[in-house]
Amino acid sequence: MSETPTKVIVNCETGVTEVLPLTAEEIADMETARVAAEDQRAAAEADAAVVAAAKESANAKLSALGLTAEEIAALTK
Amino acid sequence: MATYTLISSNVLSSSAASVTFSAIPATYTDLALRVSVRRSASGRQDLLLAVNGSTSDGSNTWLQGSGAAATSGTSSGQYVRINNIVPSTAETASTFGSAEFYLPNYTVATNKPIGSFGVGENNATTAYIGAVASLYSQTTTISSLVLSLAAGSFDTGSSFYLYGISNA
């Protein structure tokens, strides 16, 4: 059986620090938010990968046309 | 000249899923949150900041380098987030990721921009660096900050320091 995760709360007004177990609702909320955020990050990284692949393909085609690496770099600046 | 004042800090003596700074005084101009963090289990993780407890009012424009590639992107409707900078038990032992969140004009009744920067640490080819421009889309004064990971808990020894900045 795994341990219940805890949360640390630092009250800036009183200086008191509490360590409390997460409630079942908090654990569920964290998991829901985590999954949503992870999905969004994965989608953003997939988009970035598509762009990177398209750029690499375009560079290869330009190179096949006879452009030098310097000329290709100049086009994208 | 800006003056940094330590409001509160915490160094974990045991692992914790989140660290909250609550009842933040509204007496400064800006806030800066500096952390040194590690995950207590395997798998490098993202560092998340929930402002006033919100997990859905943050949007991020991020730039990331891994040692092999540079990538960028955007996200919205979630935490303020720095991707991949928290080392885990799969990374070099006793290494920590360092990050700073800067929150200017945190008491002003407008949406709040937040600037973040973080670096992971790993004695290997792959280690991450991230810079993030975020917006917390709420006009209420910032009175609490909650740090957590995208999965798992912070390891023992992770440290958290909240500063108030005057005359910024």
Image: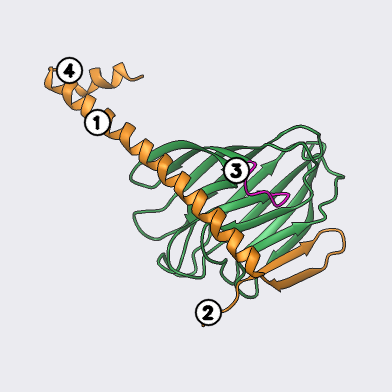
Chain colours: A orange, B green
Secondary-structure class at tag 3: strand
Numbered disc 4: secondary structure: loop
Residue B77 in percent (x, y) is at: 58, 41
The crowding category of the residue bearing disc 1, from other C-alpha atoms within 10 Å (few below 14, some 14 to 19, many at least 20), is few
Please state the chain letter of the residue tagged with numbered disc 3 in the rendered image. Answer: B
Task: Please give the residue where the numbered disc 1 appears in the rendered image.
Answer: A56
The quadrant of the picture occupied by the N terminus of chain B is top right
- Disc on res. A2: 2
**Which of the 4 quarters of the picture holds residue B16?**
bottom right
Separation of marks 4 and 1 at Cα, in angstroms: 14 Å
Q: Residue placed at 18% from the left, 27% from the top?
A: A60
Q: CA distance from mark 4 to mark 2?
A: 60 Å
Residue highlighted by disc 4: A67
Q: Which residue is mark 3?
A: B116
Measured in 3D between alpha carbons, the distance from the residue under mark 3 to the one under mark 4, in whole angstroms, is: 40 Å
Amino acid type assigned to the residue bearing label 3 in the image: Ser
Camera-nearest label, 4 or 2: 2
Q: Which residues are magenta?
A: B51-57
Mark 4 or mark 2: which comes first in sequence? 2
State the image quarter where residue A75 is shown.
top left
Q: Residue B94, position in %: x, y?
A: 49, 69
